[in-house]
Amino acid sequence: MAPKRITLHDKSFAINIPENKILEAIQQVATQINADYKDKKPLFLAILNGAFMFASDLMKETTIDCEISFLRVSSYQDMHSTGQVSEVIGLKEEIKDRHIIILEDIVDTGHTVYALLQNLTARQPTSIEIAALLLKPDCVQHPLQVKYIGMAIPNDFVVGYGLDYNGLGRNLRDIYKVV
């Protein structure tokens, strides 16, 4: 059983979303994607580091022919978005005329995924959609359409299930919020 409270660095966190609820949300997202992409063979682009757990569990529930690759982009420092996005590990696959699904752990300000969309659109894919485990609708600062949403959450700082606080907490099975 997961601890109800944890401390990472100088912050305390309380359990917010248990693993079973996360997995249920991922199953619902996979069901939608399986229906929408039947016979389309999409390329999933998982955004590292945070989306690795979401991507792994989503792939286990995906029944369509598909491929996956990983990009590493960043706009966070401590608990706040810097607003600056830097692509650390780039895309190697050709995406022209492909169906692309970006996998994000969380969309809050939207800076990261918006910048990534601009970059990918220039490469002429057939389509690009966004799948996010978590969405903070009150925080989004860009005109984004997140088609596949595991859960919408309030503007709380969260860790666990791939999300971190200065490197710690990614390995937690549940999602915790700062208290």
Image (cartoon, rainbow, N blue to C red):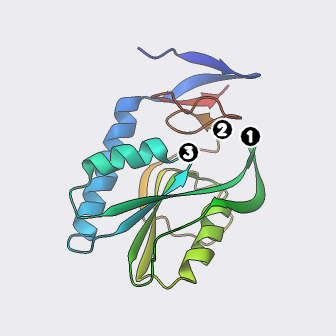
Q: Does 51 sit left or right of 80 as displayed? A: left
Q: Indicate which disc, 1 or 3, sits on the residue closer to the N terminus.
A: 3
Residue at figure coordinates x 69%, y 64% from the top left? 141
Q: Is residue 142 above or below residue 104?
A: below
Q: Amino acid at mark 2?
A: Phe
Q: CA distance from mark 3 to mark 2?
A: 14 Å
Residue 33 sits in quarter? bottom left
Camera-side mark, 1 or 3 = 3
Camera-side mark, 2 or 1 = 1
Camera-side mark, 3 or 2 = 3
The reply to whether callout 2 and callout 1 are in contact (CB within 8 Å) is yes
Q: Does 164 sit left or right of 172 as displayed? A: right
- Which residue matches tag 3? 50
Q: Is residue 129 above or below residue 178?
A: below
SS of the residue under disc 3: loop
Q: Indicate which disc, 3 or 2, sits on the residue closer to the N terminus.
A: 3
| Mark 3 burial class by Cα count in 10 Å: few <14, some 14-19, many 20+ | many
Q: Amino acid at mark 1?
A: Met
Residue 44 location (% of width, % of height): 40, 62
Quadrant of the image containing the N terminus:
top left
Residue 29 location (% of width, % of height): 34, 54
Residue at figure coordinates x 60%, y 36% from the top left? 158
Residue 167 sits in quarter? top right
- Which residue matches tag 2? 157
Quadrant of the image containing the C terminus:
top right
Q: Is residue 134 above or below residue 168?
A: below
Q: Does 172 sit left or right of 60 as displayed? A: right
Q: Amino acid at mark 3?
A: Gly
The disc label shown at residue 79, or none? 1
| Mark 1 burial class by Cα count in 10 Å: few <14, some 14-19, many 20+ | few
Q: CA distance from mark 1 to mark 3?
A: 14 Å
